[in-house]
């Protein structure tokens, strides 16, 4: 489904404000996750460094379970931190791009583009891993062209492909 012929309706603006406000909570949650990860790592370090003392109080099976659960909790915290950073930075990028596009400079840049905006989205997504690239392709309305078509774009992603 293409949205090229549709203009922004008032309800879209309300949705944008609500969704972005909801996502903005991610920054606070990311900071909380950082402190939680730090606390769990400290507990795990204390537990391991005082293994002799703790083993007198806690059974070997309980100690083993505690270390495994703390380690899994630490791993979940790291994944949560990564997702929080992605959401926070994605929201900042989205706001920056929107501000640029709404400025006079952005309007001038858009009028001077020599390729279609959807093609630009596809080309910008080239150096990224598949989850982001696939979502960009879906947003642009299809997969990146497999035939080599010359474009007037000066942005070349071939250097990123070898990384």
Image (cartoon, helix red, strand yellow):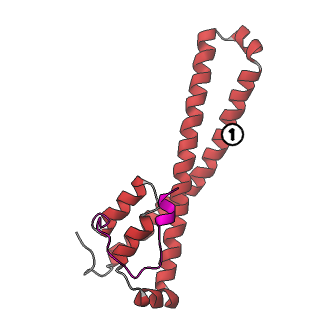
Number of residue marks: 1
In the image, is residue 19 above or below residue 115? above
Of residues 100 and 117, the one drawn nearer to the viewer in this rendering: 117
In the image: residue 26, left or right of residue 15? right
- Which quadrant of the view contains residue 66? top right
What x and y, as percent, mark residue 84? Answer: 54, 52
Which one is in front, 127 or 6?
127
Q: Is residue 140 rendered magenta in the image?
A: no
Q: Which residue is found at the position 64% from the left and 46% from the top? A: 34
Residue in view at x 71 percent, y 11 percent: 55
> Where is residue 99 shown, x and y percent of the image?
51, 79
- Mainly helix, strand or loop, the magenta region? loop
Other-residue count near label 1 (Cα within 10 Å), few / some / many at <14 / 14–19 / ≥20:
some
Residues drawn in magenta: 142-163
151 relative position to 158: left or right: left
Q: For numbered disc 1, what is the local secondary structure?
A: helix
Q: Residue at x 32, y 70 (%)?
A: 148
User: Can the viewer see residue 13?
Assistant: no
From the viewer's perspective, is 69 left or right of 153?
right
Relative image position of residue 25 (x, y in whole percent): 53, 57
Residue pictured at 60% horizontal, 28% vertical:
70
Residue 60 position (above or below residue 66): above
Reading the image, the residue beneath label 1 is: 38
Quarter holding the N terminus? bottom left
- Asked if residue 33 can be seen in this view, the reply is yes
């Amino acid at each position: 489904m293409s949205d090229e012929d549709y203009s922004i309706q008032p309800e879209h603006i309300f949705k944008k404000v609500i969704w972005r406000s909801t996502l903005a909570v991610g920054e606070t949650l990311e900071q909380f996750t950082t402190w939680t990860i730090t606390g769990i790592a400290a507990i795990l370090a204390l537990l391991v460094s005082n293994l002799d003392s703790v083993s007198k109080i806690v059974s070997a099976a309980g100690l083993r379970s505690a270390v495994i659960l703390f380690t899994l909790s630490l791993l979940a915290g790291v994944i949560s931190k990564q997702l929080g950073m992605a959401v926070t930075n994605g929201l900042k990028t989205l706001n920056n791009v929107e501000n640029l596009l709404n400025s006079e400079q952005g309007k001038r840049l858009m009028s001077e583009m020599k390729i279609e905006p959807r093609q630009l989205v596809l080309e910008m997504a080239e150096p990224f891993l598949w989850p982001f690239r696939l979502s960009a392709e879906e947003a642009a309305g299809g997969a990146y062209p497999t035939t080599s078509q010359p474009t007037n774009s000066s942005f070349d992603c071939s250097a990123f492909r070898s990384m």
